[in-house]
Amino acid sequence: MKLGCCYYPEHWPEAIWAEDARRMAAMGLQLVRIGEFAWSRIEPEPGRFDWGWLDRAIDTLAGAGLRIILGTPTATPPKWLVDRMPDMVAIDEKGRPRGFGSRRHYCFSHEGYRAEAARIVTALAERYGRHPAIAMWQTDNEYGCHDTVLSFSKAAASAFRGWLAARYGTPEALNEAWGNVFWSMEYRSFAEVDPPHLTVTEANPAHWLDYRRFASDQVASFNREQVEILRAHSPDADITHNFMGFFTEFDHFRLGRDIDVATWDSYPLGFLEQFWFSSDEKRAYLRQGHPDIAAFHHDLYRGCSGGRWGVMEQQPGPVNWARFNPAPLPGMVALWTLEAAAHGAELVSYFRWRQFPQAQEQMHAGLLRPDSSEAEAADEVRQAAAVLAEIGPQECASAPVALVFSYEAAWVIGIQPQGASFRYLELVFEAYSALRERGLDVDIVSPDADLSGYRMVVVPTLPIVPEGFAQKLAALDVPVLLGPRSGSKDASFRIPDGLAPGALKALVPLTVTRVESLRDGVAEAAEGFVVTRWREDVASDLVPELTDAQGRGVVFLHGRVRYCAAWPDRALLRLLTGRMASEAGLALLDLPAGIRVRRSQTCVFTFNYASEAVFVPHLRGVLPPASWHLDPRQTPARPPLDPR
Ligand code: GAL
């Protein structure tokens, strides 16, 4: 695994570039990502390119032995472009244009902007496509950041109509699929259909689902246009895009098929603060991040582009964008780095080299402070680089558990939560966490993945069951868990004929006759767990495997397949995944809070995310806070490394 950093030569006097490059290499960095926001400096005026500074920056960095990841600058269209083409900006759900003055102000559907994006990408690719220092291209930057996947512009409306015509053929078929007879919502032509915003009350959920599918396709096709240009001019370099954390607005599996390496931007402390975690977790993991945040995304994005993945932006210190922005515990930056290696990353690049004293991110730490002195993380980068050099390349061992993740499922639940606390990402994350707390390695896979070879499969929920999925599961003969709401809709957002779980009835013979959601704080007793947030009434001849205190079935088992008819709390997830693992013959570890294990093909890594020292039974020793232990598994002659 290579280390790198994100660098903005255009922010700094040219006189310090060479010294920066020398210091990067001396710190153990081998990669440097540049360029992704530099459009106004590359093309200061329409058609007038200024390549000189970028040529010199690339040569200076390459001269120090660094290889370059070059970003296409399409996330930051310059002012002159917006002024020439004012309707290229995205329109938000309330109908307001997204103004100039930050970034990501474009609409994915605007043909004029797409042509401009293709033009600047072509210019860059022609100039640097065969430059020997270019290792990789990054398309754009964080598609969808700042809530920018959905746009409600005229361009988007018109592209949506074309998308609908291609999908349905006739307006009658669309009316039928969406159920538009309800509330007289029928259309006589595709030209009559608008995006689903600004309606008096909620728009038809089928309308929303298609709008989300359409918007996701627009992101993928915008990206594909860049990829095609880059491949044509730069056949030897890899192509990546940097995905975000806890982000489901487009189908990353779909986009991932077009790139070589899926990368993501890892800000564990910011994510802990901004997402659903309890205040106890926020306190316990304030300076470390929840022990599954980084790993969850490593395992998700590893599944997105055929196994090659990395971290393009790694938090090095306090960020600027969360409600509260604590500093990591000493040791965490090195721990996060090695954990990425344990999960099979090929790169970790720190964001950013030097804190920039101006503009929006002036409070965001870097590896250097604005005065060029080293920030706290710099030593940890050197330390991680030394460990990586010692352990050599790591490939992650194949995981016994598949956790099925679906972007479409996230859209369905988001469009129709039916209970305010039914959150798709939280459900999947909790299932992942329950598996990781027992020391199981997990692959997070799309519903179309090949599931043969896994020893158990967990489907936290899958409201729309794709063609062939039930048959694929039936052929496996391993323990399978199907979560609540699985099979509860068809592809048109309709309750299936014969009710939920639709096609999955072939796996477990039961019918969901009623669902209810429960407000926060309501928890109905059961043995060893509670029923909270969501419960389903089930009609079945099966004797339930687990019931609540009133004797109502909560979990039904048929053959090796379980259906869980309630939101599974942690205790229930732990119970079920534990039972499944023992049925699958998988050895479980009982890891103390904050401890996680990940196996590569050559090492067993143990990480301590707790803020205090913890006795770890499988190591028969104590791990200090924010530290790790490596056990070589296939080179027993080598003595184990000392912790830290
Ligand atoms: C990412 C983004 C970077 C920078 C960073 C700050 O979302 O890609 O450009 O803004 O966050 O943490």
Image (spheres, grey):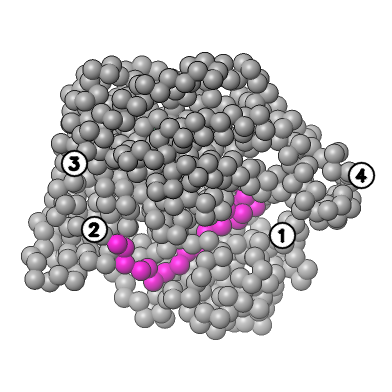
**Residue at (9% x, 66% y) in the render:** 638
Disc 2 designates what residue? 393
Confirm or deny contact between disc 4 and disc 3 (CB under 8 A).
no
| Location of residue 334 with respect to 479 vertically, above or below | above
**Residue at (51% x, 34% y) in the render:** 122
Residue 28 numbered tag: 3
Quadrant in the picture for residue 502? bottom right
| Location of residue 572 with respect to 169 vertically, above or below | below
How far apart in space, not on screen, are marks 1 and 3 (Cα)?
50 Å
**Residue at (34% x, 62% y) in the render:** 437
Confirm or deny contact between disc 2 and disc 3 (CB under 8 A).
no
Pointer 1 or 3: first along the chain: 3
Residue 188 numbered tag: 4
Disc 1 designates what residue? 491
Quadrant in the picture for residue 66? top left
How far apart in space, not on screen, are marks 4 and 3 (Cα)?
64 Å
Pointer 4 or 3: first along the chain: 3
Residue 518 numbered tag: none
Q: What is the count of numbered marks? A: 4
SS at mark 1 in the image: loop
Which of labels 1 and 2 is toward the front?
2
Give the amino acid type for the residue marked by disc 3 in the picture.
Answer: Gly
The magenta stretch spans residue 398 = yes
Stretch in magenta: 395-415
How far apart in space, not on screen, are marks 2 and 3 (Cα)?
15 Å
Which of labels 1 and 4 is toward the front?
4
